[in-house]
Image (cartoon, rainbow, N blue to C red):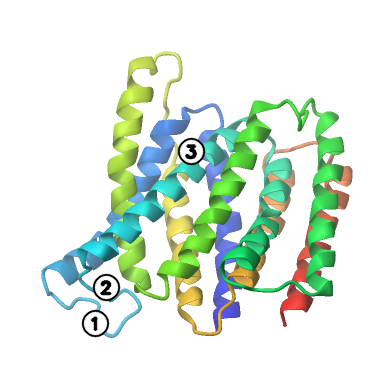
Amino acid sequence: MWLSLAFLSAALLGLYDVAKKKSLSGNAVLPVLLLNTLFSSLLFLPAILSAELGLGWFDSTPLAASRGTAEAHALVAVKSVIVLTSWIFGYFGMKHLPLTIVGPVNATRPVLVLVGALAVFGERLNGFQWIGVALALTSLVLLSRSGRREGVDFRHNVWILCLAAAAVTGAASGLYDKYIMTRLDPAFVQSWYNLYQLGMMAVVTALLWLPRRAASPFRWSWAIPLISVFLSAADFAYFCALREPDAMISVVSMVRRGSVVVSFLCGALLFGERNLRAKAVDLGFVLLGMLFLWLGSR
């Protein structure tokens, strides 16, 4: 069951990337991210009200949330900081880079998660998994060469550095998820971490964007609420997968990166991005690496 949920999460994440790219095209990053946290919070607000007021609206459903202790809220608040940091870096990278580059770079995150799982949870890599890691690293080298044809130098491009920072903090979030999801229920985590992020993002936007909004104007797009819909559904499927006792964070993280297939195809079809043949080869190495990670994790 947890593997099916991971694949569902991957498909939804691909659509999330597409909605995000559409929303950020020619738009200010911080207010888009603020609205994303707002809509995500509103989606799960009924779950919070039901739990806190004892209304029982979602009893016996996956949205049934518990009333958390102070320790539980502290754990979720830490997750909010990690995720929001990853999102800020990732959104800026997404705005300034082609989706057909962003997707494959993000798809290498399971390598970082595997290394973290090795160090933190004692998960051990076998021969197939090491081959998968090597293929993922090879894909990054090839992708850097493809990027140069579009003026994207992986060593000196600030937006690539933003993607790298987003990948590292995103991997840290994945490892932290495995830790907290053995202690908390999915509905509680997702509903409250969205709300905490909304508060944090409101402060960041007020301090960093509002004083400079004339230089970086915001415009409304109907793709913005779709970011929240696709992300919330993807995260909920992901949290439910991690609740399964036999779920492996290294495998779940790898499967979720299959979202690159959806985002790559949409980058080609909807955004008319270039140099697709070379990038498709790079993507092939990513997917082959994921296949070996999956074979090694069976």
Q: In what element is the residue under mark 1?
A: loop
Is 230 left, or right, of 45 in this rendering?
right
Q: Is residue 7 above or below residue 235?
A: below
The three-letter amino acid code for the residue at tag 2 is Ala
Instruction: Please give the residue where the numbered disc 1 appears in the rendered image.
Output: 59
Q: Is residue 137 above or below residue 21?
A: below
**Callout in the foreground (2, 1):** 2
Answer whether labels 3 and 2 touch (C-beta < 8 Å).
Answer: no
The three-letter amino acid code for the residue at tag 3 is Ile
Is 88 left, or right, of 10 in this rendering?
left
Answer whether labels 1 and 3 touch (C-beta < 8 Å).
Answer: no
Q: Is residue 273 above or below residue 123?
A: above
The three-letter amino acid code for the residue at tag 1 is Asp
Q: Earlier in the sequence, mark 3 or mark 2?
A: 2
The answer to which quarter of the image holds residue 95 is top right
- Residue 200 image position (x, y, % from top left): 31, 40
**Callout in the foreground (1, 3):** 3
Crowd band around label 1 with a 10 angstrom C-alpha radius: few (<14), some (14–19), many (20+): few
Q: Which mark is residue 113?
A: none
Q: In what element is the residue under mark 2?
A: loop
Q: Is residue 176 visible?
A: yes
Is 107 left, or right, of 245 in this rendering?
right
Instruction: Please give the residue where the numbered disc 3 appears in the rendered image.
Output: 88
Q: In what element is the residue under mark 3?
A: helix
Estimate the spatial distance between the alpha carbons at disc 1 and disc 3, rounded to whole Å: 35 Å
Q: Is residue 187 above or below residue 176?
A: below
Estimate the spatial distance between the alpha carbons at disc 2 and disc 1, rounded to whole Å: 8 Å
- Residue 55 image position (x, y, % from top left): 13, 74
Q: Which mark is residue 65?
A: 2
Is 295 left, or right, of 103 in this rendering?
right
Q: Is residue 209 visible?
A: no
